[in-house]
């Protein structure tokens, strides 16, 4: 008795991805991606500590020229 073997065929161009339409990327999509990357939450700058740090550095320079 011959055994039947099921072989899946490679999908042809006509049947491949027919269920879903591929969306074209537009300039607006690229712009949205760039804005999303730029909007990454960054650590807030502590202006008070930066100001104090610069004052200390300036005072060192003026004390010992």
Image (spheres, grey):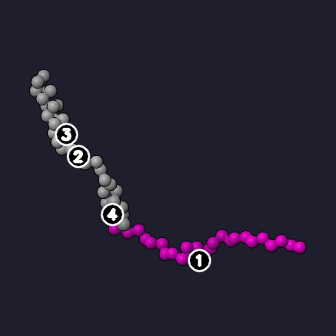
Which residue is the extreme one toward the right?
Answer: 1
Q: Which residue matches tag 1?
A: 14
Q: Which residue matches tag 2?
A: 45
Q: Nearer the viewer, residue 34 or 47?
A: 47
Q: Magenta residues?
A: 1-28
Question: Which circle marks residue 49 in the picture?
Answer: 3
Q: Nearer the viewer, mark 3 or mark 1?
A: 3
Classify residue 16 by image quadrant. Answer: bottom right
| Residue occupying image coordinates x 17% and y 42% | 48
Report x, y in % for residue 39. Answer: 30, 57
* Residue 29 is a magenta residue: no
Secondary element type, mark 4: helix
Secondary element type, mark 2: loop
Q: Nearer the viewer, residue 1 or 43?
A: 43
Q: Left or right of 34: which side holds 12?
A: right
Separation of residues labelled 2 and 4 (CA atoms): 27 Å
Which residue is the extreme one toward the left?
Answer: 62
Image quarter hosting the C terminus: top left
Mark 3 neighbour density, 10 Å: few (under 14) some (14–19) many (20 or more): few
């Amino acid at each position: 008795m011959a055994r039947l073997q099921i072989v899946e065929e490679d999908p042809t161009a006509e049947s491949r991805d027919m269920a879903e339409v591929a969306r074209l990327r537009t300039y607006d999509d690229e712009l949205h991606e760039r804005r999303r990357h730029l909007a990454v939450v960054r650590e807030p700058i502590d202006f008070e500590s930066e100001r104090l740090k610069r004052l200390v550095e300036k005072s060192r320079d003026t004390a010992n020229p």
